[in-house]
Image (spheres, rainbow, N blue to C red):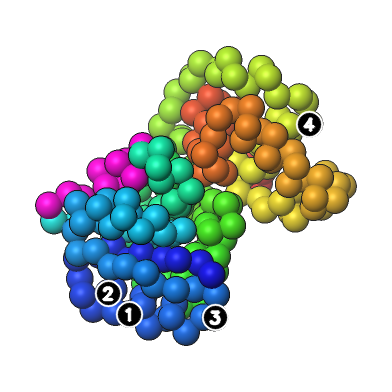
């Protein structure tokens, strides 16, 4: 069962998400929060698997709430998905860099919301939607001549190749098909890359790959 917390200052938005998600046999809404401070407190109390976090909330905004949740070692298994009204919001990139596992636009289709919760709950990043790739590419394009990260030197040639494909938004299955590997082997490579780079999840791998110049927008075509 995937345990989800809804954090949004609009009661109707929370009710809408609840009605969509509670209809799924594998998803349970364990808490709601109307501001960021409450979201952090409830996350510490209940340790949900996934937090759907509005970016704009009173008392404490979603960005700072995300930072506090990600920084708490007791919440290492909690995944945060940022909710935003805009698909190109400066705060979203900061949230992903801080450790959020992705983001969803509030007017997303119900099936995409359900899929997103499941994707993040199993430890993947919510990076497949075109809007997310565009967001990361937009901000990554502002980085000029970034220095190479020393930790990248620990990767094998194959792992570097896999990292580039992860950064391009490909799933394990898509990586396996492109490199003629089994999905299990592709997953193993990704797990090793995460461990070597000390990254929380695939979202952080994407940011690292762009910020070190390992990949540039449009690389995959």
Q: Rounded to the nearest whole Å, what is the CA distance between mark 3 and mark 2?
A: 21 Å
Q: Residues within 10 Å of mark 1 (few under 14, many from 20)?
A: few
Q: Which residue is mark 4?
A: 158
Residue beneath the point at 36% across and 64% down: 5
Identify residue for label 1.
Answer: 16
Q: Residue at x 75, y 42 (%)?
A: 188
- Is residue 45 in the magenta section? no
Q: Is residue 145 above or below residue 196?
A: above
Q: Which of the pair 128/82 is nearer the observer?
A: 82
Percent position of residue 181, x then y:
86, 47
Where residue 7 appears, as percent x and y from the top left, is 28, 62
The alpha-carbon separation of the residues under discs 4 and 3 comes to 39 Å
Asked if the residue at tag 2 contacts the one at tag 1, i.e. Cβ–Cβ closer than 8 Å, the answer is yes
Q: 111 and 34: which one is in front?
A: 34
Residue position for label 3: 25
Residue under label 2, please give it: 13
- Neighbour tally class for label 4: few under 14, some 14-19, many 20 plus, Cα within 10 Å: few
Where does the magenta region start and end? Answer: 59-71
* Residue at the extreme left of the image, as rendered: 59
Q: Earlier in the sequence, mark 3 or mark 1?
A: 1
**SS at circle 4:** helix
* Residue 122, placed above or below residue 27: above
Q: Is residue 73 above or below residue 46?
A: above
Pointer 4 or 3: first along the chain: 3
Alpha carbon separation for disc pair 4 and 2: 44 Å
**x and y, in percent, of residue 95 in the image:** 36, 44
Magenta span: predominant SS is helix
Mark 4 to mark 1 CA distance (whole Å): 44 Å
Nearer to me, 100 or 121 = 121
CB of mark 4 within 8 Å of CB of mark 3? no
Say which element carries label 1: helix
Q: Seen in the image, is 8 located left or right of residue 154? A: left
């Amino acid at each position: 069962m995937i345990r989800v917390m809804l954090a949004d200052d609009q009661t109707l938005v929370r009710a809408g998400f609840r009605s969509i998600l509670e209809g799924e046999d594998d998803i349970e809404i364990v808490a709601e929060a109307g501001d960021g401070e409450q979201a952090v407190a409830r996350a510490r109390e209940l340790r949900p698997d996934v937090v759907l976090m509005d970016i704009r909330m009173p008392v404490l905004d979603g960005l700072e709430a995300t930072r506090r949740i990600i920084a708490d070692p007791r919440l290492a298994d909690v995944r945060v998905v940022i909710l935003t009204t805009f698909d190109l919001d400066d705060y979203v990139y900061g949230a992903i860099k801080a450790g959020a596992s992705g983001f969803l636009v509030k007017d997303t289709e119900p099936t995409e919301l359900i899929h997103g919760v499941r994707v993040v709950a199993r430890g993947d990043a919510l990076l497949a939607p075109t809007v997310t790739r565009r967001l990361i590419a937009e901000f990554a394009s502002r980085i000029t001549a970034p220095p190479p990260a020393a930790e990248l030197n620990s990767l094998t040639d194959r792992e570097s190749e896999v990292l580039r494909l992860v950064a391009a938004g490909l799933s394990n299955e898509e990586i396996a098909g492109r490199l003629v590997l089994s999905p299990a082997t592709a997953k193993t490579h990704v797990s090793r890359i995460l461990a070597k780079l000390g990254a929380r999840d695939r979202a952080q791998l994407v940011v690292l790959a762009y910020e070190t110049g390992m990949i540039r927008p449009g690389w995959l075509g």
